[in-house]
Amino acid sequence: MRNGYALVTLHTDGGFTEAFYETGVGQPIWQRSWTAAELAARQPWGRTVVGAVRAIPAAEFRQA
């Protein structure tokens, strides 16, 4: 790929799809989907970890 982008789509079942696109081409040049079960099998503790997001209070933001 010379000039393109990647797109990750999260699914409600805990899986995701990763795709790579070449600029100007409508179809991905490579795409792979993982189910929640496949991801859980890769984790040593047997469950999928979905990224934890911490809410940041407005007071912690600094004006640039």
Image (cartoon, rainbow, N blue to C red):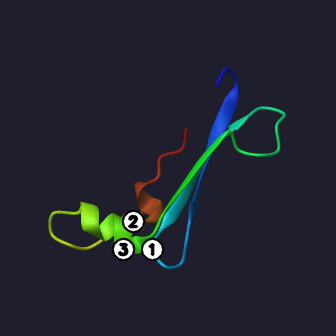
Identify which amino acid the numbered label 2 is placed on.
Val
Q: Find residue 40 and name its label.
A: none
Q: Residue furthest bottom?
A: 13
Direction from residue 52 to residue 35 in the image, left or right: right
Identify which amino acid the numbered label 1 is placed on.
Gly
Place of residue 28 in the rendered image (x, y in percent of width and height, measured from the top left): 70, 44
Q: Find residue 37 and name its label.
A: 3
> Residue 52: in sight, yes or no?
no
| 37 lies above or below 34 | below
- For the C terminus, the quadrant is top right
Q: Residue furthest left?
A: 45
For this rendering, which residue is in front, 47 or 62? 47
Q: Find residue 53 and name its label.
A: 2
> Residue 18: in sight, yes or no?
yes
Q: Residue at x 45, y 69 (%)?
A: 35
Q: Earlier in the sequence, mark 2 or mark 1?
A: 1
Place of residue 1 in the rendered image (x, y in percent of width and height, measured from the top left): 64, 25
Q: Residue at x 25, y 74 (%)?
A: 47
Crowding at label 3, few (<14), some or many (≥20) Cα neighbours within 10 Å? some
Marks 3 and 2, how far apart at CA: 22 Å
Marks 1 and 3, how far apart at CA: 9 Å
For this rendering, which residue is in front, 2 or 63? 2
Crowding at label 2, few (<14), some or many (≥20) Cα neighbours within 10 Å? few
Marks 2 and 1, how far apart at CA: 15 Å
Residue linked to disc 1:
14
Mark 3 secondary-structure assignment: helix
Q: Residue at x 42, y 68 (%)?
A: 55
Q: Quadrant of residue 36?
A: bottom left
Identify which amino acid the numbered label 3 is placed on.
Ala
